[in-house]
Image (tube, rainbow, N blue to C red):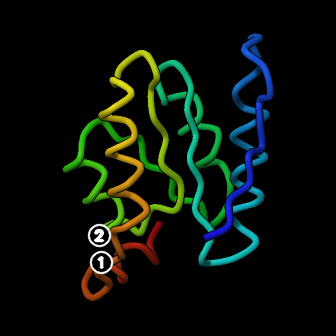
Amino acid sequence: MNYFDLGPSSDYRVDYPDYAHKVARKVKISKNNVGILVCGSGMGMNIAANKHKNIRAAQCFNLKSTKLSRLHNDANIITLGSRLLTKKNALNCVSVFLNTKFEGGRHLKRIKKI
């Protein structure tokens, strides 16, 4: 699996929408691409990424919400809140996100309505 780190490259404050848009544009290139976005709450990144056509960003809080975001919603970007999750929980969510496949079936009809 290839990955790209699209920044930021320092600990200085940045405008999170800039990075959400970068990741969303990269994810849209291929149906197989997925993205991981992190900000303080995960909400800002989620809102910005979901402005893009064919992006289904899911703000995840635990393993169940993460798994369902992939199984039922075919989420292609996970957003996480660094102030809301422990590092261990966030890493576990990322692992579940990357290893869970979309169920399709009845969910595909719903995804097409988004």
Eyeballing the image, is 36 above or below 42? below
Q: Position of residue 48 (x, y in %)?
A: 64, 38
Question: Considering the numbered disc 2 on the image, is that residue within a helix, a strand or a loop?
Answer: helix
Q: What residue would you read off at disc 1?
A: 107
Q: Which tag, 1 or 2, sits closer to the chain's start?
A: 2
Q: Which kind of residue does numbered mark 1 sit on?
A: His
Q: Position of residue 11 (x, y in %)?
A: 72, 14
Left or right position of 108 against 22: left
Q: Quadrant of residue 28?
A: bottom right
Q: What residue would you read off at disc 2?
A: 71
- Give the number of callouts: 2
Using the image as rendered, state which of residue 44 and residue 102 is in the foreground.
102
Eyeballing the image, is 94 above or below 10? below
Q: Residue at x 32, y 84 (%)?
A: 104
Question: Considering the numbered disc 1 on the image, is that residue within a helix, a strand or a loop?
Answer: helix
Q: CA distance from mark 1 to mark 2?
A: 8 Å
Q: Residue at x 41, y 49 (%)?
A: 94
Q: Residue at x 29, y 69 (%)?
A: 71
Whether residues under marks 1 and 2 lie with C-beta atoms below 8 angstroms apart, the answer is: yes
Left or right position of 95 against 8: left
Q: Residue at x 77, y 44 (%)?
A: 6
Q: Residues within 10 Å of mark 2 (few under 14, many from 20)?
A: some
Q: Position of residue 1 (x, y in %)?
A: 60, 71
Q: Nearer the viewer, mark 1 or mark 2?
A: 2
Using the image as rendered, state which of residue 60 and residue 54 is in the foreground.
60
Q: Which kind of residue does numbered mark 2 sit on?
A: Leu
Q: Quadrant of residue 19?
A: top right
Left or right position of 97 against 27: left
Specify the farthest residue to the top. 12
Q: Position of residue 24 (x, y in %)?
A: 69, 53
